[in-house]
Amino acid sequence: MQTHPSLKRIQEVAFQLQDDLLQLDIDALDVSESVKSYFRYDLTKLSYVSKCNAFILYHLLLNPKSKKSSTIIVDHGAGIGLFSFLVKRMGYTCISHDLFDEYLDGIRKIGTALNARPDYFVLGDTNALVAYCHFHDINILGLASRNVIEHLPDYRAFFNDIASLGPEGFSIVITTSANIHNPLVKRLHLKIHKEYEYKGSRVDMDHPDLDESFSGIQLRSALIKNHFPQLDSETIRRLAILNRSYIEKEILKRTEYYIQSGHWPSPPNESSNTCDPITGAWVERLVAYADYQSAAQAAGFSIEALPGFYNTNYSSFIINCMSIILNGLLRFKHPFILNLSPFLAMKLTKK
């Protein structure tokens, strides 16, 4: 294991892992259908995912301020564990963390098949991860979180919670596809928000069909109707629209306000962002880098934005050429890095 492995070396390992994943017969493993669906979905963009994971690990390890007292890396919100497997292939100790036990079970079995099984598994939210590390007296070298922060109920609380996971100088690399600064990406996410609100969400990753019963408006309408059956359907729908981006407790409080005062609650502060009213998980939440920066600094981190990069493995030659040109522009420091980058990438270092 190298102290600061080069990006080229990490990519070599990532591409070998990619080849092994492509050879893996996921249907032969005793894992849940949701894990198989997730796996098949990632295979459709595996080359780009491999490059993203190598990018994250490289920047996580490129940390001259770290005291290197630990070789433990956390895969926060690990999903099916593709980053965890890369960490193991690079020779580091890995903690795989996720909200869902079926995904952790999938990581165990896929990791075993790949000879890249993570060392520790933590089920639960970020608080559970922090509690686990404190109970076992684990100090970490770094934490990686890819496409998770845009779903967290409270990113400010997240920064505060993870600040205790390591000593001064430990690193966190966070990436999110929800880059509000890129106009095309923002437009795509506005469409995703509208789709969730009115048409619903996917049942699983294998099927593009949307289930309208899981749309934001339907979920909030059901909550309001269940607690306030005296309200007519038109009133319920309007209250459901006005309560976008609020969770159940807040929705009920704002509906009580309407019933008692006769005044409609104020519209949501979030421009288009919407969340699951039961879990509080956001749907691809768009947040400005400046807001992330402020929250990270308040939690005791320094923070820098990292330039992302575009996928160059599309079937279209023209799109790949455009991606190569944009990637060339992203190598230079200029004020429009965030506007050009396809995803938002941030590196936090504990002060």
Image (cartoon, rainbow, N blue to C red):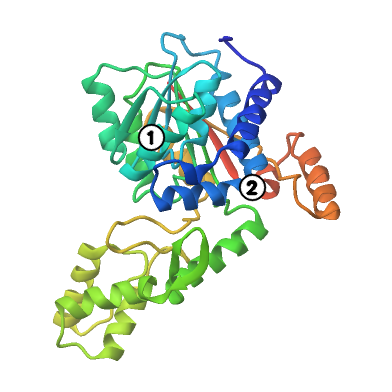
Q: Nearer the viewer, residue 31 or 343?
A: 31
Q: Which mark is residue 45?
A: 2
Q: Which mark is residue 136?
A: none
Give left or right: position of 280 versus 26.
left
**Residue 331 location (% of width, % of height):** 76, 34
**Residue 316 location (% of width, % of height):** 81, 55
Residue 237 seen in this snapshot: yes
Q: Tell which residue pokes out farthest to the front in this image.
A: 28
Give left or right: position of 236 versus 347.
left
Whole-Å distance between the Cαs marked 2 and 1?
36 Å
Q: Which residue is mark 1?
A: 298
What amino acid does circle 2 point to? Answer: Lys
The quarter in which the C terminus is drawn is top left
Neighbourhood count class around disc 1 (C-alpha, 10 Å): few under 14, some 14–19, many 20 upward: few
Considering only vertical position in the picture, is 200 above or below 98? below
Give left or right: position of 281 versus 79.
left
Dot 2 or dot 1, earlier in sequence: 2
Residue 267 seen in this snapshot: no
Question: On the image, which quarter does residue 161 sit in?
Answer: top left
Q: Nearer the viewer, residue 102 or 57?
A: 102
Considering only vertical position in the picture, is 241 above or below 294? below
Local secondary structure at mark 1: helix
Local secondary structure at mark 2: loop
Q: Nearer the viewer, residue 38 or 328?
A: 38
The quarter in which the N terminus is drawn is top right
Residue at 40% over, 64% down: 269
Residue at 19% over, 69% down: 253
**Residue 8 location (% of width, % of height):** 71, 22
